[in-house]
Amino acid sequence: MALIKSISGIRGTIGGKPGDNLTPVDIVKFAAAYGSMILQKNGKKVVVGRDGRISGEMVSALVVSTLRGLGLDVIDLGMSTTPTVELAVPGEKAAGGIILTASHNPKEWNALKLLNSEGEFISAEEGAVILEKVQKEDFIFAQVDKLGEYRMSNDWLQKSIDSVVNYPLVDVPAIRERKYRIVVDVINSTGALFIPPLLKALGVEEVILLNEEVNGRFAHNPEPLPENLTGLSLKVQQAKADLGIAVDPDVDRLCFVCEDGGMFGEEYTLVAVADYVLSKRPGNTVSNMSSTKALKEVTIRRGGEYYPSAVGEVNVVRTMKRVNAVIGGEGNGGIIVPDLHYGRDALVGIGLFLSALSHHKNGIKSFRSQYPDYFISKNKIELAAGINVPAIFEKIKTKYKNHPINTDDGLKIEFDSDWVHLRTSNTEPIIRIYAESNFETTANNIALRLMQDIKEFIAP
């Protein structure tokens, strides 16, 4: 099993030995370190929310009690979404927030994602402070008469929906006029609580839910990739629906299925939404360097400038702020709308995508045909303990030294109009290998070639 401590939080598998897995001991230490940093900033209030995982209630109880034990007041949103917690932190004038979710990871995983007072992921510097506090157990708990207060808040589901419906570029009348029938795979998590009322507020005529019981026992691998969405594709065809929607367990990633059951392509979620936003509000865009080049082409066509960032939401946000981007995100279906909040948000993504689609006279497959068919082959290699990844990357860098190479985030190698990006994951003990080409076979072959290189360099 695994425990991953990073500057963005702690993530691991539930159970086992402290320090090797995400146990109650590790949860308390990390929550205490984060809470101590908040107190040092003279903070008093923290927002906590969780997805629908099996371990969520247990982890939440530990986190809430630890924060209160430090003397911090806690506003508990209960089962919520990542974008909702991000909105609630500044909305409640809190000093920070914790989202209890392992995002797309399987059911045995959970995590503490840490926010600052703006509802954004903490900086690398703040993350380093927390890791040091965990290592040194540098936290002091409050005396009995100074324990923090607790308040449960049920207001933020509606506030989150209202933020989408009232967003200026979300065209509710146009969506309502189309009388859509939509199938949604909510993967046994909190999307089941948020997406049906959102779609109703947007004027969607009929909503069919898949995996709607919020029990955390995910009916399939929860990462919204084509191989995991066969049930959604089939249901869209059977129900003669206009489209399908899939989200991950904490509702910050988003992808669509066309009326014939084919994939719209998670890479093109951001492309389509950005194209719509840029048509109304010209400006710059940002995505991470593992994302499709189609966003750059759309941005230039709309008169803006595209900027790449390192992988990771915090890196995308930093670049978006630097270049004053009007829209940004990641090719995994993560959309960031900066004037709403600086975080990936599938809820506003649904509102903007349906607005764009409603202005297209034909269906979603025709809508997709407006954009080029670039193919990204997404692969991964699991890492055993002790593997020296930097040494492997150095050998690959030497092998491909005659090609343009970017080392800002792992290795990105360019082959004429194609590229491959190798990097270690921030959330799992793996190397991700992404390759893009105009042709699916070429993308797969590039990825396979680099995967073979990695395996050969690991073998000795």
Image (cartoon, helix red, strand yellow):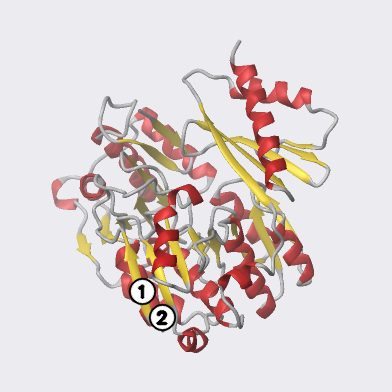
Tell me how far mark 2 sits from mark 1, CA to CA: 7 Å
Q: Quadrant of the C terminus?
A: top right
Q: Secondary structure at mark 2?
A: loop
Residue drawn at 56 percent across, 80 percent down: 169
Q: Quadrant of the N terminus?
A: top left
Decide which of 63, 220 is in the foreground and name it.
Answer: 220
- Res. 197 image quadrant: bottom left
- Are the residues at dot 2 and dot 1 in contact (C-beta closer than 8 Å)? yes
Residue lying farthest right? 402
Residue drawn at 36 percent across, 49 percent down: 101
Provide residue 268's location: percent of width, then percent of height: 61, 61
Identify residue for label 1: 207
Q: Is residue 203 above or below residue 270?
A: below
Residue drawn at 46 percent across, 52 percent down: 224
32 vs 377, left or right, is left
Decide which of 74, 138 is in the foreground and name it.
Answer: 74
